[in-house]
Amino acid sequence: MRIGELAKRTGVSERSLRYYEKQGLLTAERTLGGHRDYSDGAVDRVIRIQELFAAGLHSKKIVQLLPCMRDADGGPSEIATPRLVNDLVEERERIDRMMADLVRSRDVLDEVIDAASDSRRQTVTHLEDRQPRALPGSGSGTGEAAISRS
Amino acid sequence: MRIGELAKRTGVSERSLRYYEKQGLLTAERTLGGHRDYSDGAVDRVIRIQELFAAGLHSKKIVQLLPCMRDADGGPSEIATPRLVNDLVEERERIDRMMADLVRSRDVLDEVIDAASDSRRQTVTHLEDRQPRALPGSGSGTGEAAISRS
DNA sequence: CTTGAATCTGACATTGATGATAACTCTTAC
DNA sequence: GTAAGAGTTATCATCAATGTCAGATTCAAG
């Protein structure tokens, strides 16, 4: 597939896809005229790259990490060097700290939101019933559910 | 206290503290000569600002948010406007998505780390026993424990 | 008063992913 | 073949917090 379609499928801009290539995160065959031609696996790869970016890893770390990741097609993955493993453990700890921060911040937001919601119910007796944001047995649970790893 | 001590106590650079002031996030009395003189509450406030920054909120949002937060001294907190509440709900959702991403990324890291660890045990029969990263009943649990809000 | 440490303001740089534009080339459908 | 749309490279810009440096001023202690 070509860059436009990959961009559409992944939601990542063409600009970023070219940037990923320059960083060594993503490769593509080239057509005779020089246009990039991506394999199907590129979609998954791009999505994973995005997740790792979102987790705060820098492209350099991701470059080292990618060949060690079990691909969707279960290709042979390299074994991380001790040096890399060390870095990854640190990243893991950083991610844990970040999640703890996020929980605190989310609680802060909830306090403010709840206070406003309560206030409005008291003073105005607002029309709509208050919707609890954290649904009890929710299926949409992106936050509360299943944080622990399997 | 003065800026140097506040920086030391919070771990935030003096540069950032001045920046916070310029953004309207933090206020300080001024000494006769113009030096900043912070109240004790500044420590908590700075820490909270840092957490909100870490959660991806921009200073403008934090500026609006801060007066609505229950202070440590339980001062009278303003009620968030509906407009702000709307923004905060969106931020909340963004944070939830971010946490879900973080979990996925952490799992990816774990896979790579585990694969390396296993490999090394197989080939080298490494000296040290493998330390489980996720301690079972852990107290250090910054990640697994207590993600759900109270 | 003097001296050294701390602080002040202000300006410029950095970081890293991404946006935007320009000028040119390829692909594809007609 | 041609025109339109998509792709190419390259460069400059942005954002937001923070680093850093320079020159002037203040504070605290001897």
Image (cartoon, coloured by chain):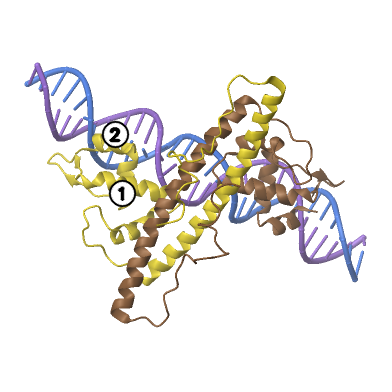
Chain colours: A yellow, B brown, C purple, D blue
The chain letter for the residue carrying disc 2 is A
Three-letter amino acid code at the position of disc 2: Lys
Along the viewing direction, whichever of D22 and A133 lies nearer the viewer:
A133
Numbered disc total: 2
Q: Residue at x 40, y 53 (%)?
A: B105
Disc 1 designates what residue? A22
Tags 2 and 1 touching, CB below 8 Å: no
Side of A140 relative to C11 (left or right) = left
Along the viewing direction, whichever of B98 and B143 lies nearer the viewer:
B143
Along the viewing direction, whichever of A51 and A27 lies nearer the viewer:
A51
The chain letter for the residue carrying disc 1 is A
Image quadrant for the C terminus of chain A? bottom left
In this view of the protein, can residue A81 be seen by the observer? no
Three-letter amino acid code at the position of disc 1: Lys
Q: Residue at x 53, y 53 (%)?
A: A98
Along the viewing direction, whichever of B97 and C11 lies nearer the viewer:
B97
Helix, strand or loop under label 2: helix
Side of C5 relative to A111 (left or right) = right
Side of A37 relative to A79 (left or right) = left
Helix, strand or loop under label 1: helix
- Counting from the top left corner in percent of width and height, residue A94 is at 50, 58
- Counting from the top left corner in percent of width and height, residue B41 is at 77, 48
Disc 2 designates what residue? A8
Residue count near mark 1 (Cα–Cα under 10 Å), binned few <14, some 14–19, many ≥20: few
- Counting from the top left corner in percent of width and height, residue A20 is at 32, 47
Image quadrant for the N terminus of chain A? top left
- Dot 2 or dot 1: first in sequence order is 2
Residue count near mark 2 (Cα–Cα under 10 Å), binned few <14, some 14–19, many ≥20: few
Give the spatial CA distance, label 2 vs label 1. 20 Å
Q: Respond whether the residues carrying marks 2 and 1 are from the same subunit.
A: yes
Q: Residue at x 57, y 39 (%)?
A: B58
